Amino acid sequence: MSRYLIDRIKALPNVTIYTGAEVIALEADPSGALSAATFRGLDSGNVNTYTMRHLFLFIGADPNGDWLAKRVAVDGKGFVMTGADFAPTDEPIGRAPLSLETSVAGVFAIGDVRAGSTKRVGAAIGEGAAVVAQIHAALANQGV
Ligand SMILES: Cc1cc2nc3c(=O)[nH]c(=O)nc-3n(C[C@H](O)[C@H](O)[C@H](O)COP(=O)(O)OP(=O)(O)OC[C@H]3O[C@@H](n4cnc5c(N)ncnc54)[C@H](O)[C@@H]3O)c2cc1C
């Protein structure tokens, strides 16, 4: 989440922030609307239930790349490294990688899953457009 959004939410007088906790249960009132949520502290294991009417699920911040990590170099958070991001010792590809190319020659990463990318729709689209030229360059390099 953008820093300015975090700061604005923190400054709201009617918002209490609980960090380091996961939602483990939701309760509904007789009409079916949300009435409470139960959180469990990730470190403490403490379980607390809070009355609330609204819940915003902020999902999508973790890359779904566990399976990729066995093949291409990823950073400490599992984002795929491209270009100069990965050390030459990580599965060297034998030539300088293109900026959107992973540690495996001919395999490219774009969008949110790419380490260092701007996590925005426009950025992902732009990288999608840019990678086409790099794929052509990689194929040309192989004489295809
Ligand atoms: C809550 C939230 C709010 C956001 N708000 C904004 C906003 O206001 N403005 C903005 O510009 N950006 C916003 N973003 C960011 C924006 O959604 C992303 O930057 C953008 O969607 C990235 O596009 P992508 O194609 O890289 O990844 P995604 O859109 O995440 O697409 C990846 C796709 O790959 C699929 N996938 C994953 N694993 C596999 C697999 N193993 N096999 C096959 N398919 C797989 C997924 O199901 C998904 O469909 C927001 C993101 C979140 C989570």
Image (cartoon, rainbow, N blue to C red):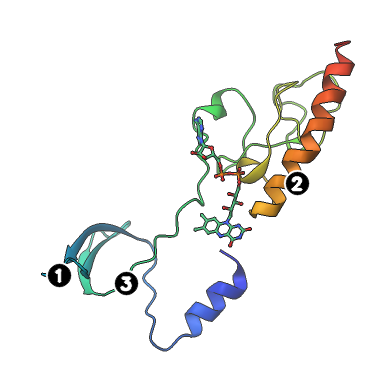
Q: Secondary structure at mark 1?
A: loop
Q: Which residue is drawn at the image coordinates 39% and 74% (left, top)?
A: 17
Lower sequence index among marks 3 and 2: 3
Q: Which residue is drawn at the image coordinates 77% and 34% (left, top)?
A: 131
Q: Which mark is residue 69?
A: none
Q: CA distance from mark 1 to mark 3?
A: 14 Å
Asked whether, in this view, residue 131 is left or right of residue 112, the answer is: right
Asked whether, in this view, residue 19 is left or right of residue 36, the answer is: right
Please name the amino acid that badge 3 sits on. Answer: His
Q: CA distance from mark 3 to mark 2?
A: 35 Å
Circle 3 residue: 54
Q: Secondary structure at mark 3?
A: loop
Q: Position of residue 73 (x, y in %)?
A: 64, 30
Say if disc 1 is inside 8 Å of ligand 1: no
Circle 1 residue: 31
Circle 2 residue: 126
Is the Cβ of the residue at disc 3 closer than 8 Å to that at disc 2? no
Question: Is residue 63 visible in this depiction of the protein?
Answer: yes
Q: Position of residue 114 (x, y in %)?
A: 65, 41
Please name the amino acid that badge 2 sits on. Answer: Gly
Please name the amino acid that badge 1 sits on. Answer: Ser
Question: Is residue 116 visible in this depiction of the protein?
Answer: no
Above or below: residue 135 compared with residue 120? above
Q: Looking at the image, which is closer to me, 41 or 68?
A: 68
Above or below: residue 116 compared with residue 139? below
